[in-house]
Amino acid sequence: VAGEVAEGSLKGKTLTFVSYGGIYQDGQIAALKEFVDKSGVTLLSDGPTEISKLQAQVESGNVTWDVVDTGDFPPYVYCGKLFQKLDFSKIDTSNIPEGQISECSVPAMNYGVVLMYNTEKYKDNPPKSWKDFFDIEKFPGSRALE
């Protein structure tokens, strides 16, 4: 990002970045250091990300959050309402995998979700899909999602 901003172009401006807090957000702020130093922007950090807080800001007309790290779902549902449509003429999306961009968001990271099961218990007929995962009659026992 820092390479795409003119030296001092945001001097005197403030940008509020919102995320989930803790070491996760500390890492994000550290990753933004080069951008902050080059642009001259004052970076404020807030959180945690809560859609109800964003909605209250929008409804009151007092929006203080500029960049919000959130899950995939809210920008799709609230695009043009709580989330502003992005100007893609100003955003380089050439390195973003197809299908990960919406009118109101670009991905901050990628990760995978895997289905795991006890191979001893389900040797001959293991779960093969998320439908199987949620089928408690065919596959009884505890479930865990994170």
Image (cartoon, helix red, strand yellow):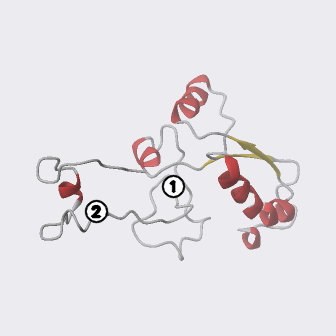
Residue 16 position in % (x across, y down):
72, 44
Q: How many marks?
A: 2
Q: Hey, what amino acid is under mark 2?
A: Tyr
Q: Residue at x 32, y 63 (%)?
A: 116
Relative side of 41 to 77, left or right: right
Task: Verify CB contact (< 8 Å) between mark 2 and mark 1.
Answer: no
Residue furthest out toward the bottom = 95
Displayed quadrant of residue 34: bottom right
Which one is nearer the viewer's eye here, 82 or 139? 139
Residue at 19 percent across and 55 percent down: it is 131
Label 2 crowding class (10 Å Cα cut-off): few <14, some 14-19, many 20+?
some
Q: Which residue is mark 2?
A: 117
Residue found 30% across the figure and 49% down from its top? 143
Instruction: Identify the residue position indicated by label 1 in the image.
Output: 105
- Left/right placement of residue 25 relative to residue 55 reads right
Q: Which mark is on residue 40?
A: none
Q: Position of residue 134 (x, y in %)?
A: 21, 50
Q: Residue furthest top?
A: 60
When the figure is inspected, residue 77 is found, relative to residue 57, above or below; the finding is: below
